[in-house]
Image: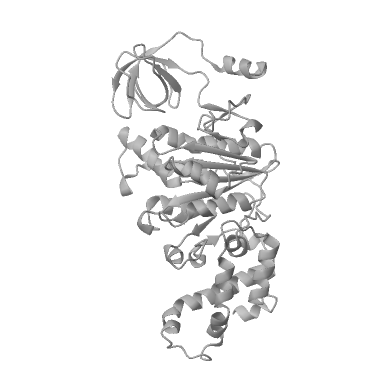
């Protein structure tokens, strides 16, 4: 280990002999006393009998008594175990050595490729970018997916949500975005997902290529606190590279599991449940994470994609509803399109990009509007067309939609391993829609 790294680690440790004691333990919270602590202080619980150690966070204080939510499980600990204050606080080591690695929320490697010697410590919890320090989103961020680049164009520093039910294709689309993006740095946070999905995502969706990519993992069997702060830790890694002036792609799967972790923590601390059992803290936590993405003047940008699991395909789910109000756009995946064999199953009519109009050409914009209009006409008259009740020539615009149906369906379909350039996508869309004609045709 380099001497500078060792020196930093030693200086970050607390050498105080002051300690408190555990007085009560339940399944999710450890109660202790004997230390002067503040909310969000990091503490270490040490069992003298079983030689177990774990780290936790102070989440509630009641006079001399304080309550700790542990980062691991509480089996093996008992009353009388010692509690030490960790002076390093909630900081993680970051650096270029993280690139190409798979780590846990504390930046400890889990890929069996040796230790990581990062020397810079950064806090997991930081304030979002100040409103007046945010840069204008005026550049296209290409992801190599035709339906997104062409019809839901994303800008550098934009925050988008990918909304879908289970088994609709979120992971496949995530892999397409990571592979298709030209971002110099890519940070992927897998929060609360099944452990089996981690190697599958790396090998199947990313093809085993982790070049310039960092993957932060907190699986469903980790503690709620580990899942919660895994998301914040991943955002801190992205911010480290953004502060170097780089454009970062940040992808998190999923916001719903992140909110569920806070639900477990909040309910254990006695917060009142609201819609679907979510306490108020679950909803206030979302902007604290999502608003940290964006473009900052004089620095780089974080373009973020957050997946949201919609239970029962219900878009009125409280987490989905809150996320849509915070994000700069939403991409909705359709189970119906999956059943028809259309991949990626992006429901164009239910999706939107709030910055698209400011970053694409007028020709491209007219083509998008024309595509959406013709696609809507097809959907509205689908039953009439299928049963043969529509007579060709009745509606010239519907006739055009029928003639271009195959071309439009081909445009929104794409193989998982295929990458399309933004220029080709834009040109093909303009040519297909004949958008070089007068905008009056859209009226």
Can residue 63 be seen at all in this image of the molecule? no
- Badge count: 0
**Image height of 142 relative to 224, above or below:** below
- Give the vertical position of 248 relative to 17 (above or below): below
State left or right for residue 183 relative to residue 34: right
- 331 on left or right of 139: left
Residue drawn where x is 53% and y is 61% of the image: 352
Q: Specify the quadrant that holds the C terminus.
A: bottom right
Q: Is residue 22 left or right of residue 307?
A: left
Colouring scheme, one of rainbow, by chain, secondary structure, one colour = one colour
Residue 193 lies, in percent from the top left, at: 43, 43
Quadrant position of residue 51: top left
Residue drawn 50% across the image and 32% down it: 105
Res 59 → quadrant: top left
- Direction top: furthest residue: 17
Q: Quadrant of the N terminus?
A: top right
* Residue beneath the point at 51% across and 57% down: 330
Can you see residue 398?
yes
Q: Nearer the viewer, residue 406 or 250?
A: 406
**Residue found at x 69% / y 70%:** 363
Name which quarter of the figure residue 8 lies in: top right
Is 99 located above or below residue 142 in the figure? above
Residue 227, percent across and down?
A: 44, 36
Residue 181 x %, y %: 64, 51
**In the foreground, 355 or 423:** 423
Q: Position of residue 138 (x, y in %)?
A: 68, 55
């Amino acid at each position: 280990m380099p001497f500078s790294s060792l020196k930093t680690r030693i200086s970050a440790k607390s050498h105080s002999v002051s300690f408190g004691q555990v007085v009560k333990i339940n399944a999710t919270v450890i109660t202790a006393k004997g230390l002067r602590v503040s909310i969000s202080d990091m503490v270490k619980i040490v069992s003298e009998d079983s030689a177990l150690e774990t780290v936790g966070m102070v989440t509630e204080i009641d006079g001399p008594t304080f309550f700790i939510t542990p980062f691991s499980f509480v089996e093996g600990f008992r009353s009388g175990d010692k509690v030490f204050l960790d002076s390093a606080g909630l900081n993680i080591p970051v650096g270029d050595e993280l690139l190409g690695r798979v780590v846990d929320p504390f930046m400890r490697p889990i890929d069996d490729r040796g230790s990581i010697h990062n020397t810079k410590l950064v806090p997991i919890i930081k304030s979002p970018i100040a409103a007046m320090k945010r840069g204008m989103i005026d550049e296209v961020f290409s992801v190599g997916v035709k339906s997104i680049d062409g019809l839901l164009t994303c800008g550098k520093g934009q925050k988008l949500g990918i909304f879908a039910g289970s088994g609709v294709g979120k992971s496949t689309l995530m892999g397409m975005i990571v592979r298709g993006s030209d971002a110099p740095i890519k940070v992927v946070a897998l929060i609360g997902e099944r452990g089996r999905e981690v190697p599958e995502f790396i090998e199947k969706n990313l093809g085993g290529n982790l070049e310039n990519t960092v993957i932060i993992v907190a699986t469903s069997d980790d503690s709620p606190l580990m899942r919660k702060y895994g998301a914040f830790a991943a955002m801190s890694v992205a911010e480290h590279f953004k502060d170097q002036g780089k454009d970062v792609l940040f992808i998190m799967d999923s916001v719903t599991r992140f909110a569920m972790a806070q639900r477990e923590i909040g309910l254990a601390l006695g917060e009142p449940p609201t819609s679907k059992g979510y306490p108020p803290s679950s909803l206030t936590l979302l902007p604290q994470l999502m608003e940290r993405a964006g473009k900052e003047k004089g620095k780089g940008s974080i373009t973020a994609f957050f997946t949201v699991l919609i239970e029962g395909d219900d878009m009125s789910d409280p987490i989905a509803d809150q996320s849509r109000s915070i994000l700069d756009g939403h991409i909705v995946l359709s189970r119906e399109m999956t059943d028809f064999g259309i991949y990626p199953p992006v429901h164009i009519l239910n999706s939107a990009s709030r910055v698209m109009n400011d970053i694409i050409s007028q020709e491209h914009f007219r083509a998008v509007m024309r595509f959406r209009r013709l696609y809507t006409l097809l959907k509205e008259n689908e039953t009439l067309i299928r049963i043969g009740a529509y007579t060709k020539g009745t509606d010239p615009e519907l006739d055009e939609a029928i003639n271009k149906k195959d071309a439009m369906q081909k445009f929104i379909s794409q193989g998982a391993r295929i990458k399309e350039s933004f220029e080709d996508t834009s040109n093909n869309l303009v040519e297909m829609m004949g958008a070089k004609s007068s905008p009056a045709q859209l009226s």
